[in-house]
Image (spheres, rainbow, N blue to C red):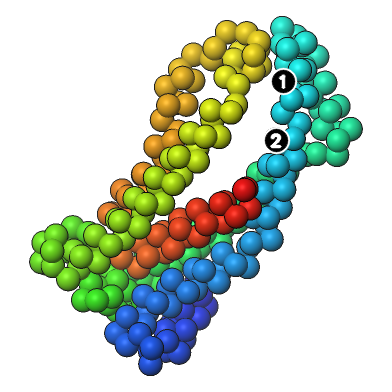
């Protein structure tokens, strides 16, 4: 962890001539983008896997129609289809899971007040007057919504809201093209109890990022906003 902190601090030193007091904040954004760039091959693999599974959707729907009342036969048929088409059912999820350790590591780095028993120096810097170690409540207490720190958070909230709206629209379009999931498979059987409520809630999940940004230190909020925005752009390009 301290190694990553040292890298970000050195990056901040390099950015000092360009960004002045905001060099640490710029370093967090740039470092996050560089890490996302390193795991881009995994994201591309996930996108290819999802597209491959999507191409099998008509055949899967036909199998569910034929074997919807026989779950064991349906499962065998689905596995045979994936094997025949050389598509793994997990091809779109494993790359994403491999990225999680890096994301959790960065989040911990930018939200911990101490690292290795020492003060996290990253959190002692500022962005336009907003301490990177403070939270939104601190900003409201210091100068209110229209104080220096409050306006920084207002900008972050605006970016997150815009990204969340795009994610909401994309999820609604994706879900609109999918058949309803039932106990016997899509298109065959009774609706799964409670699934309708969950389905309605899914498009709104991106807006939960607003809560995250509001409760974590500003350094972690910068990471979250940068990573969320990167994800939105990445998905728009890879899944077009």
Residue at the farthest bottom position: 17
Q: Quadrant of residue 80?
A: top right
Q: Is residue 165 above or below residue 192?
A: below
Q: Earlier in the sequence, mark 1 or mark 2?
A: 2
Is any part of residue 157 visible from this angle? yes
Q: Is residue 236 above or below residue 177?
A: below
User: How far across and how far down the image is residue 143, in percent?
Assistant: 10, 66
User: How far across and how far down the image is residue 151, in percent?
Assistant: 20, 65
Alpha-carbon neighbours of circle 1 within 10 Å: few (<14), some, or many (≥20)? some
Residue that appears at 28% across and 75% down: 127
Q: Secondary structure at mark 2?
A: helix
Per the image, the residue denoted by label 2 is 54
Q: Is residue 229 left or right of residue 191?
A: left
Residue that appears at 57% across and 51% down: 235
Alpha-carbon neighbours of circle 2 within 10 Å: few (<14), some, or many (≥20)? few
User: How far across and how far down the image is residue 211, in percent?
Assistant: 31, 48
**Decide: marks 1, 2 in contact (CB < 8 A)?**
no
- Judge by depth and name the residue closer to the eye, 237 or 222: 237
- Judge by depth and name the residue closer to the eye, 32 or 124: 32
In the picture, the disc for residue 124 is none
Per the image, the residue denoted by label 1 is 61
Q: Is residue 231 left or right of residue 39?
A: left
Q: Quadrant of residue 112?
A: bottom left
User: How far across and how far down the image is residue 161, in percent?
Assistant: 34, 50
Q: Secondary structure at mark 1?
A: helix
Is any part of residue 134 visible from this angle? no
Q: Is residue 168 left or right of residue 156?
A: right
Q: Is residue 112 above or below residue 82?
A: below
Residue that appears at 40% across and 60% down: 225
**CA–CA distance between discs 1 and 2?**
11 Å
Residue that appears at 63% across and 68% down: 38
């Amino acid at each position: 962890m301290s190694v990553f902190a040292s890298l970000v601090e050195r990056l901040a030193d390099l950015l000092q001539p360009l960004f002045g007091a905001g060099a640490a904040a710029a370093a967090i954004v740039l470092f996050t983008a560089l890490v996302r760039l390193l795991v881009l091959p995994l994201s591309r693999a996930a996108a290819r896997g999802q597209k491959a599974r999507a191409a099998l959707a008509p055949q899967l729907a036909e199998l569910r129609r034929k074997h919807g009342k026989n779950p064991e036969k349906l499962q065998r048929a689905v596995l045979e289809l994936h094997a025949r088409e050389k598509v793994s059912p997990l091809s779109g999820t494993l790359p994403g899971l491999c990225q999680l350790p890096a994301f959790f590591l960065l989040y911990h780095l930018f939200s911990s007040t101490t690292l290795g028993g020492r003060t996290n120096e990253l959190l002692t810097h500022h962005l336009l007057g907003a301490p990177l170690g403070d939270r939104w409540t601190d900003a409201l207490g210091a100068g209110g919504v229209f104080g220096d720190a409050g306006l920084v958070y207002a900008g972050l909230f605006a970016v997150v809201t815009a990204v969340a709206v795009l994610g909401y629209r994309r999820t609604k379009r994706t879900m609109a093209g999918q058949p309803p999931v039932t106990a016997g498979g899509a298109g065959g059987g009774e609706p799964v109890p409670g699934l309708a409520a969950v389905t309605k809630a899914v498009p709104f999940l991106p807006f939960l990022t607003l809560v995250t940004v509001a409760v974590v230190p500003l350094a972690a909020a910068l990471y979250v906003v940068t990573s969320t925005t990167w994800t939105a752009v990445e998905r728009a390009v890879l899944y077009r």
